[in-house]
Image: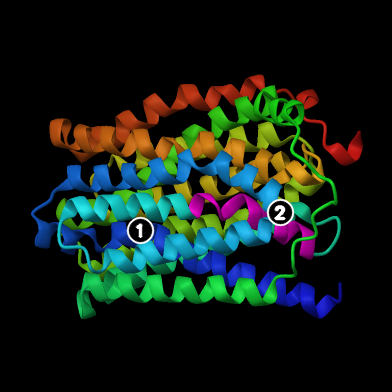
Amino acid sequence: MSRINNRRAVASLIFGRLIYAVNWYNFAAVFTLVARDMTQNVSGLGIAVGSFYLGVGSFQIPGGLLAAKIGPKKTAVYGTMLASSAALLSSMATTFSQLLVLRFLVGTGMAFVFAPAVVLMARYFRERAEGFSVGLFQAAFYLGGALGIFGWAVLAEVWGWRESLAISGGVGILTALLMLLLVPRDSLHEGFAMELLEIRKIVANRWLLLQGVGLFAVNGFSSLVAAFMVFYLQGSQHASAVLAGGVGALSLIGSLISSPLLGSLHDRIRNPALLMFVSGLLGIAGLEIASIPSVLAAIFASLIVGFAAGGALTVGFAAARELAHAEYETLAVSCINSTQLFAGFFFPPIFAWSVLRFGYSSAWLLSGLYLFPFLGALLLAKTKSFVPRHAA
């Protein structure tokens, strides 16, 4: 494989990841206008976020199995096309029920993209920099998320929420075509067949299970800030769309900074559970800061939560990939991703109910308290449980 092909593959994957993130986050950014058109409130946002995460969480493992069977490139291209097409169709929805179904399909498509793309990034990036490559890939996600939250909040105000969703869906389809053209063809091993014993070893791996539970907490505080911060600031703190979108995007900026930083640290310090636990504690502290009813507190909370989540998730994905043989890398990453993503299904509706029952300050505060026990699972994931395949 020539170096220029590697660079083109990496560039197409990074661009695809950026637009993938726009379609992940922009619905929350435009929801104020959606709510106005379709007579919804914070509970509608909680249900929509839960619907999306149900799709993206439920199909992670099927996506990993499909990638093991047909290759990561094909799986990533198919998933990107499905997610982007559903995002485009969201602009044409006439009822909120249709939007819920389409957000589920956006999540379903995205479930088939992440783990295969992580493997492709590590494969076509430079050797012995797996942690940094995953960090760079995650950084593209957070940059795209910041664009999706801030840029689409402003874009929707100027052009309308339907037009803004149509743009992101259309560009997403373009990224699928670029990956199809620029990423080298999958080179599957001849005679390879998935073995049930190997699949069981990965799915039942104690370290992966504990790490997934710990990252369940991380995605919990990350998804709450990403989904609700803009709506909270516009509704409760009476902030403008520009200010609310900017503050909401700060969480992704924090993640953008921490992802390559913690990825590189993981390459040198082989104690992923400790790195994730410390990052998780920082993120929960950020949620508690959000309970202070002010824009300044929201700014600090967004930055802290984003920094913590970006670092913890990058370390987790890089470590999970290193546990499996080449054919099952995507499955290992999918297992941990599936567990942590279900936080986005459970916690946003709970948070929305808490807001309606107790108000935003209490909802932010309570969220940190009920997420902490899940984070404690990382204390049980001892370093000796982590034995990278290349060290065996």
Would residue 129 be found to the left or right of residue 78 on screen?
right
Q: Is residue 112 magenta?
A: yes
Quadrant where the C terminus is found in the figure: top right
**Residue at the spot 75% in from the left edge and 57% down from the top edge:** 122
Furthest-left residue in this view:
39
Q: Secondary structure at mark 1?
A: helix
Residue 377, image x and y in percent?
A: 57, 22
Q: Which residues are magenta?
A: 110-124
Mark 1 residue crowding within 10 angstroms, few (<14) / some (14–19) / many (20+): many
Quadrant where the N terminus is found in the figure: bottom right
Q: Main secondary structure of the magenta part?
A: helix
Query: Camera-side residue: 58 or 342?
Result: 58
Q: Amino acid at mark 1?
A: Gly
Mark linked to residue 119: 2
Query: Camera-side residue: 175 or 250?
Result: 175
**Residue at the spot 42% in from the left edge and 69% down from the top edge:** 147
Q: Give me the C-alpha separation between circle 2 and circle 1.
A: 30 Å
Q: Is residue 204 magenta?
A: no
Find disc 1 in the rendering and name its residue.
248
**Residue at the spot 86% in from the left edge and 76% down from the top edge:** 2
* As drawn, 370 above or below 103: above
Residue 53, image x and y in percent?
A: 40, 44
Q: Amino acid at mark 2?
A: Val
Query: Camera-side residue: 104 or 236?
Result: 104
